[in-house]
Image (spheres, helix red, strand yellow):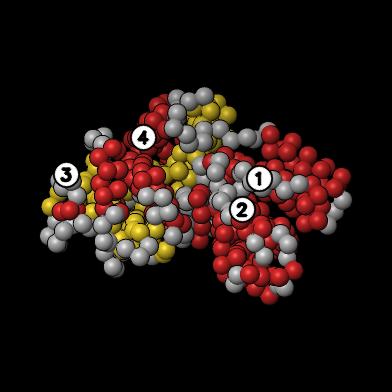
Amino acid sequence: MYARGGGWDAGCESRGAGAVNPAESFEPFRRRLMGLAYRMLGSLADAEDAVQETYLRWHGAKRETVQEPRAFLMTTATRICLDMIGAARARREEYVGTWLPEPVVDAGALGVELAEDLSIALLLTLDRLSPLERAAFLLHDVFDFSFEEVSRALERSEAACRQLAARARAHVREVRPRGVISSENKEKHAALLTAFLGATRSGDLSGLMSMLSIDARVMADGGGKASAAMNVLGGADRAARFLIGATRKGWREEYTVRAATINGLPGAIVDGPDGPVQTVAFEIENGLIRGVYIVRNPDKLQRLPKLLSGGNPQIAKGDGDEPVQAYIAAMPGWKRDVGARLDGIIERTVPGVHKAVKWNSPFYGVTGQGWFLSFHCFAKYVKVAFFRGLSLEPVPPVESKSGDTRYVHYFENGEFDEAQFAAWVRQASELPGEKL
C-alpha cells in the first residue's frame, strides 16, 4: 500500500489505536513523519520539533476514536509544518547568503527508500513552491495519500488539491535529480570525487574544469557563521576558480576528508579536530559535475556523526535498527559498504535479530539469549567480534585477550567469504550470548 515514504507497520492500521500506549502506537510512524517534516521544512531540527509536537497531540487525543492512525498522524504533522513554514520563511529572509537544506547522511532515519527523494535540487524546488503545493505534492506523490485524504488534511476540495499537486509536479519534473548513488555508478562517482578533491587541492584549474559541465553551479551555505560564497556561482570557469581559491585559503593540514552519501548524492564530509566543518554533495549528469552543494554553517553540521580515533563513528547508544543504520551510514568510505553487507547477512541469517548500538559499536543478539556479535571501525579494517568464537567451526582467525571471543578483520579490497560469515553467524546465534 505504501511504497515511497518509508517504513511503517501496516498492522497499525487495523489495530485499535487505544489498545496500546501512545508511545508504542506512535513509534512505527516516527520515521515516516520525520521524512515528511524534513521535506516540508528543510531542517532536521525543525522536523524533530514538528514530530515531537505531533506526538504530544497524539498523546492528548482520544485515540480509541481514531480509526486510521496513519492518516491522523500525517495530517497532524502536515498542519504543524504548515504553521511552522511561516516562521521559517521569515527567518530565511534574514538569512545571510545562500540557504541550503540541512545535510542528511542517514536517509534511513527519514524512512527514505529512494535516494532521489532527498536530493538537494529537489528540496530547493520544494522550498520555492507554495506551502500548500508542497504539502499536496508530498502527501500524494511521495506518501501515497489519495486526493480524498489530501483534501481532508489540507481542508481544501479534491479538485483544488489535484491542481496544487499538478502545479508542484510540473516544477519538480524539471529538476528530477541526477547522479544519485546506485550500485551501477558508485565506482564512477568515487573516482570522480577523488579526482575532484585532488584537482581542488593541487590548484589544477584545467583538470577541474574538465570535470564540470558548462552550466555547472556552486552553492555554498555559511549562514553568516562560516566563510562561503554569498551568491550562486554559475559556469565551469567561474565555479572552478572559486573552488580552487576557497580550498587554497581554507584548507588546514589537520583536516581529513571522508566519502559520504549526502541527501542521496555522492559527496564528502570534511572533518576538523572538533568534528565536521563542511559537507559537499555533487549532482552528476553524463559523467560531469553539474552542481556542487557546500554546507559550512556550523548549526547545520551539528547532527552529523563525528569520527573517533581510527575512524569509528560516534553514535549515541540506542536499541533497535535505527541507531545501527545511523552507525553504518556514518562509516567512512569503503567501510560503509562492508557494514551494510555485514548487517544484511546477519538479518537474512537470523530473522528478527535484536540490534543495538553500545560503546559506539553495533551489537546483534537474540532476545533472551544475549549478544553474539558486534563490529567496530579501525583505521585499516573493520573488526567483527564473535563473543563465543572459540565454539564456532572453524574458529574465526584472529585471537583476542578475552575469554571465548574471536575476531575477523575485513580490509579494503580484501576477501569477504559471505558463506563462511553466514555460517559463523548462524552458529553464534544458537549459542548463549553475552549479557551486557
Q: Give the mark nearer the N terminus: 1 vs 3.
A: 1
Residue 431: tell me if it is visible: yes
Q: Amino acid at mark 3?
A: Pro
Q: Is residue 161 left or right of residue 304?
A: right
Of tags 1 and 4, which is closer to the observer? Answer: 1
Crowd rating for badge 4 (residues with CA inside 10 Å; few <14, some 14–19, many 20+): few
Q: Amino acid at mark 4?
A: Thr
Question: Residue 83, image x and y in percent?
Answer: 73, 63
> What residue sits right under mark 4 in the picture?
194
Question: Residue 318, image x and y in percent?
Answer: 41, 64
Quick one: SS at disc 2? loop
Question: Residue 393, image x and y in percent?
Answer: 18, 46
> Residue at 62% across / 59% down in the picture?
12
Q: Give the mark nearer the N terminus: 2 vs 3.
A: 2
Give the vertical position of 417 relative to 132 (above or below).
Answer: above
Report the Cα–Cα distance between label 2 and label 1: 8 Å
> What residue sits right under mark 3 in the picture?
394
So how many labels did they put on this image? 4
Q: Is residue 249 left or right of residue 113?
A: left
Residue 1: mark: 1
Crowd rating for badge 1 (residues with CA inside 10 Å; few <14, some 14–19, many 20+): few
Report the Cα–Cα distance between label 2 and label 4: 43 Å
Crowd rating for badge 3 (residues with CA inside 10 Å; few <14, some 14–19, many 20+): few
Residue 249: mark: none
| Circles 1 and 3: CB atoms closer than 8 Å | no
Seen from the viewer's position, the closer of residues 317 and 280 is 317
Seen from the viewer's position, the closer of residues 317 and 342 is 342
Residue furthest to the front: 430
| Circles 2 and 1: CB atoms closer than 8 Å | yes
Residue 45 appears in which quarter of the rendering?
A: bottom right
